[in-house]
Amino acid sequence: MIQPPEHIKSIKPYVPGKPVEELERELGISDPVKLASNENPAGPSPMAIKALRKGVADLNRYPDGDCYYLRDALAVRLGINGNELIFGNGSNEIIELAVRTFMGPGDEAVMAHPSFVVYSMIVQAVKGKNIIVPLKNAKHDLDAMASAITDRTRIIFIANPNNPTGTINTAAEMDAFMKRVPDDVLVVVDEAYYEYVSSPEYADSMKYFRQERDILILRTFSKIYGLSGLRIGYGISKAGIVSEMNRIRQPFNVNSLAQRAALAALDDRKHIERSRGINERGKKYIYKGLKSLGISFVPTEANFVFMTFENDIAAELYEELLKQGVIIRPMGPRAIRVTIGLARRENKRFIEALRGVWEARGRNFLS
């Protein structure tokens, strides 16, 4: 059988969260809850659903390759020009477009760890070199990341808020960092959870865009807008950078239903505010439950909570919670991440299941 080159063969494939249907089949559990993939538990915008129903009859037509109507609406909303936007099959595709456009073999990309695993996968796929900088106090160590820049650095990835920790970098931290970044390095700021942030110290990445810095800001309709299944995200950057990325973008990369739903969801302020409210209440509930169990966690600005342990128990804890119909995400041997869900059905179910494991195994299990 034909074999891929070594730089492809050595990539560890992305492992998605276990589907609810698979858990039901494997363990015979009815009504499980999935808290592994940071999806919006409120579901999609009702306005998006209505738009989807209208669009089904036109599925024989290719989508608008330029996302004309969505581009126009977002440009107005953001106060920018339409040619400063690029759309993708999720923001994942835009990450790939940026790497494939601006990196070649031997070029370097600076990123944090742990952070979104897709960054390193795509860099490796183009024979680039990943420069990994450990988190400091669970967030990006921007000072160390700036010090890691060399003459081979082409891209720097900053997830703000960071996945999996939910932490943010402040405006002051980003200002100091951007002063140290050379003009020929592209700073990719991944703001997938932007709409959930409530901290007044959160960095305004659009400021650097307005300063005409080489920055690519990524946002998505997968999270607070509840359109994960349709896969649509967008990037904001200089027209010249967008133009270069469009050279390799597939002509019909964003399907027509995704475009319709995103355009409708953009104006559904009621759904966005409801989703924020669910998240804030759920966050407080989970914090309280974890404190009562003495479990260490990182305060979050996103729609998930990151927990850490002193022992290598994450895999076993994952399996024990699965048996009780709760799907979470192990993040290495000593950490897990749980999505903030609906109050009674999901958050309460998670805390009660976690408490059950605690009581059954004793404090040594979770300490």
Image (cartoon, grey):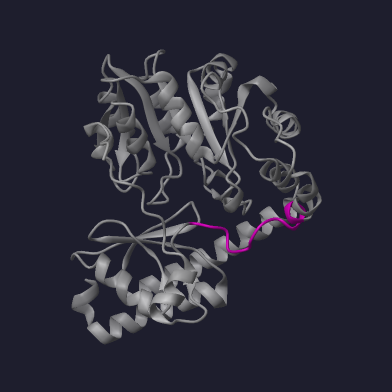
The answer to which image quadrant residue 96 occupies is: top left
Tell me the residue at 27%/36% (across/down). Answer: 2
Q: Which residues are magenta?
A: 38-49
In the picture as drawn, the residue positioned furthest to the bottom comes out as 360
Along the line of sight, the residue nearer the viewer: 355 or 234: 234
Residue sitting nearer the eye, 98 or 178? 98
The residue positioned farthest toward the front in the image shown:
1
**Magenta stretch, overall SS:** loop
Side of 276 relative to 290 (left or right): right
| Residue 106 visible somewhere in the drawing | yes
The correct choice, above or below, for 58 with respect to 282 in the image is above
202 left or right of 227 in image: left
* The quadrant where residue 160 appears: top left
Q: Which residue sits at x=49%, y=72%?
A: 33
Q: Residue at horizontal 35%, vertical 44%? A: 115
The answer to if 44 sits in the magenta stretch is yes
Please provide percent x and percent y for residue 201: 49, 41
- On the image, the x and y values in percent for residue 334 come to 24, 61
Q: Is residue 344 above or below residue 52?
A: below
